[in-house]
Amino acid sequence: MNVDFITAIKMYFANYANFKGRSTRAEYWWVMLFMFLVSCALSLFGTIGNYINYAFSLACLIPGLALGTRRLHDTGKSGWWLVIFYIAMAACFAWVVTILVKNAPGLLTGNPNEVAMMGEEILPVIASMAIPYMVMFAGSIWWIVLMCKKSEPDNQYGPNPYGEY
């Protein structure tokens, strides 16, 4: 079953907390485009738009997790891969924040006297952040490839949403 943009958005909100079944590539990527467009549109409204965007993103957390789980089911994978992906990304983010807090606290507090790291002082900080950023980049590429994977034939999560394989 191919879905268009509007149908995908309707299905996304209709299946708000449905972690069972399968979702097609089209459904997943149309929703990702919708979320991106909403985020861009809200960012045009400055600080208020950012707060609304945070609230909207929070409201879409559960349906986003459900959609990701159903998309993984469509590729024959368990929804727990989604948990592994987010834990890995959160760990890398925490790693970067820890590096910044330890080596450049002024970047977080905005104190100009503490931000004055230049030249040789900042190179080790940048180098130490390379590994978590590479892991996040590789994880993101892996996720995109996984979400682009073709539908599996009928599997333990349900029939192929495209019908005959």
Image: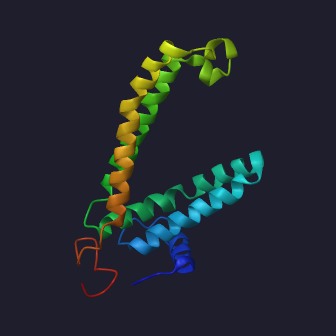
Q: Is residue 82 visible?
A: no
In the rendering, at what x and y percent does residue 86 appear?
Answer: 40, 46
User: Image quadrant for the N terminus?
Assistant: bottom left
Q: Is residue 7 above or below residue 82?
A: below
* Quarter holding residue 113: top right
Which residue shows up at 22% across the image and 74% down it? 155
Q: How many marks?
A: 0
Which residue shows up at 77% across the image and 53% down it? 45
Which residue shows up at 41% across the image and 36% down it? 133
- Asked if residue 20 lies left or right of residue 33, the reply is left
Residue nearest the viewer, comparing 81 with 36:
36
- Asked if residue 81 lies left or right of residue 155, the reply is right
In the rendering, at what x and y percent does residue 115 appear?
Answer: 62, 17
Q: Is residue 143 above or below residue 100?
A: below
User: Image quadrant for the C terminus?
Assistant: bottom left
Which residue shows up at 62% across the image and 63% down it? 37
Residue nearest the viewer, comparing 113 with 1:
113
Colouring used for the render: rainbow
In the rendering, at what x and y percent does residue 135 appear?
Answer: 35, 39
Residue reaching furthest bottom? 164
In the rendering, at what x and y percent does residue 149 appear?
Answer: 31, 67
